[in-house]
Structure formats: structure tokens, C-alpha cells
Amino acid sequence: MAGYFELVDAPDGGYRVRMLDGAGNLMAISVTFPTKRAAVAGVAMAREIAGTGLIRDKSHDGAGSVIRDRVRPVSVPKEEAARRKKLTPVHRAVVG
């Protein structure tokens, strides 16, 4: 199963978005958004960044280098990998 986003109440008011993997493990949590509409727009931005964004290594030994390798998720279920192979390039862009 693919990961998903959850809108949750922020402790100080407003909303946050949690990104979870297919098993329900927390992967990321957003900044606080003032409205649900803004939070949903934040999800749209995160989807775009995730699909096209570079990885900048800001760790102590990374020196700000850009990691250009395309890596696959740590574990992609066989059914999902098989389904993606059957998709056309246009469908892949939409599905992920």
C-alpha cells in the first residue's frame, strides 16, 4: 500500500500534515498551517517537491553536496513494482 497524508490539529492552533508510509510509520510532519485549505495546498507542494527535488547533503560530512543518484524506496512490494512496470510514462507521472 502506498503512503498517505493526514491532516491533524496543531498544538498551537491551525493544522499540520503528517506523511506516513504504507505501514503507518511517520515519515515527516509539516509546519503549522492556518487553515485546512492551506494544509492541503502544502500537501500538493510536498508532492511536487518529492517528485522533482534534489537531495542536499547537509550532514557534518556531506559539505552541502547534491546527491544525484535516483534511489528506489527501501521496500517496494512486488505487486506495486509489477503494477508500475505496466504503466505508460504518462500514467507513471500521475501515479508516482
Image: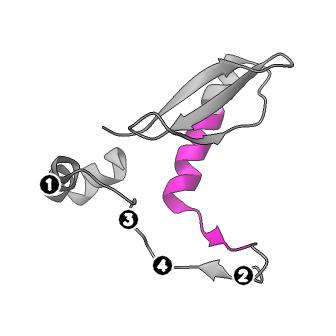
Q: Secondary structure at mark 3?
A: loop
Give the camera-side residue of 61 and 2: 61
Tell me if mark 1 has few (under 14), some (14-19) or many (20+) residues whose alpha carbon lies within 10 angstroms of its own.
few
Residue hosting label 2? 62
Q: Is residue 33 left or right of residue 48?
A: right
Residue hosting label 1? 82
Which residue sits at x=74%, y=83%? 61
Q: Is residue 62 magenta?
A: no
Q: Is residue 43 depicted above or below 84 in this figure?
A: above
Residue hosting label 3? 72
Q: Which residues are magenta?
A: 42-58
Q: Quadrant location of the N terminus?
A: top left
Mark 3 → mark 4, Cα distance in angstroms: 10 Å
Give the camera-side residue of 48 and 84: 84
Q: Secondary structure at mark 4?
A: loop
Question: Which mark is in front, 2 or 4?
Answer: 2
